[in-house]
Image (cartoon, helix red, strand yellow):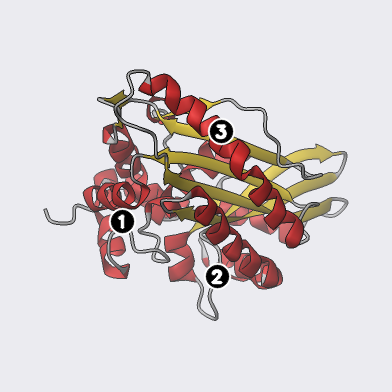
Amino acid sequence: MSNALKTINDKKFNDVFIEITHSEDLGTTNNKELRLFRLKEIIDNDFSKDALNKFVSRNIGHYVFSRSKVKEYYDEDDEMSAGVEALDLMWSTGDADQKGTGNELGEVLLYAFLESVLDAPKIYSKVELNRTVRSGNSHCDSIHLKVLPQSGNTLNFEMVFGSSSVVGDLGIAIDNAFEQVKCIKGHRSDEMKIVDQTVFDLPEDDPIAVQIQEIITPKEGTQVNRDSAYGLFLGYTLGLNKDRSDYRQAVDKKMEADIKKYLPKLKGHIQTLGLTGRSFYVYIVPFDDAETDKNTVMKKVMRKGD
């Protein structure tokens, strides 16, 4: 069911990212993922961003607009305009890499990972949340829908509330993301209402509107269980010596060491917030220089300076 709602063009995802295996676990009692990825291509001991730039650019229209809006472009044989007008909208909301506008790389990659890896289609991206919410503000960087296995006549869903942070230090990235999680938790009912109230502003045949209506007003004889969950995208500076001859091999080992080092901090935040019974989906990606790289990528995607 969720595949039909998927928006992202992720055919090239595995050409951009490679997953690094590890043995660490979040230790929560519900659904969970703690997964490490890195940019696939390393040239002269630097992560190549070329494939990432293309991947983000290819998906910018789907990130910014609803399914029904994108479908309009395709029905009019004008799909190229979706990307152009998406960029126009992003330019009008703020600068490239400005946190909170939807223009920040972490906000975009949160959307990409929750759709591509978790298979949780977006309800709203950060850009859409900023445009859609008329009263009050959402504390999320995105909201996604995770469809869980059905039990008889019971439909099971998770509303995945997204938080992202891309900074130099992984510990600070974790702290920042969980500050946002704390805010989301404190306004969980409001976040749920945002979806329940605004999704009906979409056209009646919009796929996500149809799906959400089935959750809000289930068919007779159908039970619906809807819980909250949290999806995190964390980016940080790897901080590995560029002069070593075994750099490629050392990258993966450093990532494994980093997650082992910072796992107690992740677990500590979850426990402190009393969320050990909630589902957590965490995706972590290192950069050469997180602050510089995220700015450079989004400026290129948004064509700042062209």
Residue at the image position 74 percent from the left and 61 percent from the top: 272
Picture quadrant where residue 286 is located: top left
Q: Position of residue 130 (x, y in %)?
A: 45, 69
Label drawn at residue 51: none
Question: Along the horizontal axis of the image, is 223 left or right of 165?
Answer: right
Label 1 close to label 3 by CB (< 8 Å): no
| Residue denoted by label 3 | 257
The vertical placement of 283 against 206, above or below, is above
Q: Pick the residue in front: 248 or 192.
A: 248
Q: Is residue 120 placed above or below 89 in the rendered structure?
A: above
Q: Gap in Å between the C-alphas at discs 3 and 2?
A: 35 Å
Residue found farthest to the left: 306
Q: CA distance from mark 1 to mark 3?
A: 39 Å
Q: Between label 2 and label 1, give the one nearer the viewer.
A: 2
**Label 2 to label 1: alpha-carbon separation:** 21 Å
Q: Which element is circle 2 on?
A: loop
Q: Mark 2, residues whose alpha carbon is within 10 Å: few (<14), some, or many (≥20)?
A: many
* Mark 3 crowdedness (10 Å alpha carbons): few <14, some 14-19, many ≥20: few
- Residue drawn at 64 percent across, 51 percent down: 265
Quadrant where the N terminus lies?
A: top right
Where's residue 76, x and y in %? Answer: 30, 47
Name the residue beneath numbered marker 1. 86
Looking at numbered disc 3 in the image, what kind of residue is underneath it? Ala
74, 138: nearer the viewer: 138
